[in-house]
Image (cartoon, rainbow, N blue to C red):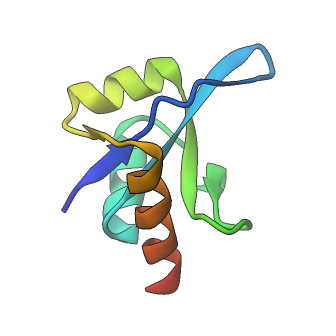
Amino acid sequence: MTVYVDNEQIQWRGKLWCHMVADTLPELHEFAQKLGLRRSWFQDHGQYWHYDITVSKRNMALALGAVPGDKRTIVTCAKKLKEEN
């Protein structure tokens, strides 16, 4: 199983943000917990399920074994995650 992070760097509230997804929902939540993210920050109200993470959390995720993903990989994985849950 794999956790993916993009490098979108969307500016919001004075910070740059990226997206984090995974092959399975349990894996995604477990990895988010390792990063110190709250479960309530999980984005499950839109078309794609994911966590929004700051660039510093992205760097931490990469250090913990997450894989850089391009937009296609992130969207495909996020859609699959939602469909399977």
Q: Give the percent coordinates (x, y) of residue 33.
A: 41, 46
Q: Give the percent coordinates (x, y) of residue 36.
A: 46, 36
Q: Give the percent coordinates (x, y) of residue 72.
A: 44, 54
Between 28 and 11, which is closer to the camera in this rendering? 11
Residue 64 placement, left or right of 84: left
Furthest residue toward right: 13
Q: Give the percent coordinates (x, y) of residue 13.
A: 81, 21
Between 30 and 55, which is closer to the camera in this rendering? 55
Identified at 34% across, 24% down, the residue is 60
Q: Quadrant of the N terminus?
A: bottom left
Identified at 34% across, 55% down, the residue is 30
Residue 73 placement, left or right of 19: left
- Is residue 68 visible in the rendered structure shown here? yes
The number of numbered badges drawn on the structure is 0
Residue 20 placement, left or right of 24: right
Identified at 35% across, 42% down, the residue is 69
- Is residue 85 visible in the rendered structure shown here? no
* Rendering quarter of residue 28: bottom left
Furthest residue toward front: 72
Q: Is residue 2 above or below residue 53?
A: below
Identified at 50% across, 20% down, the residue is 55
Between 37 and 70, which is closer to the camera in this rendering? 70
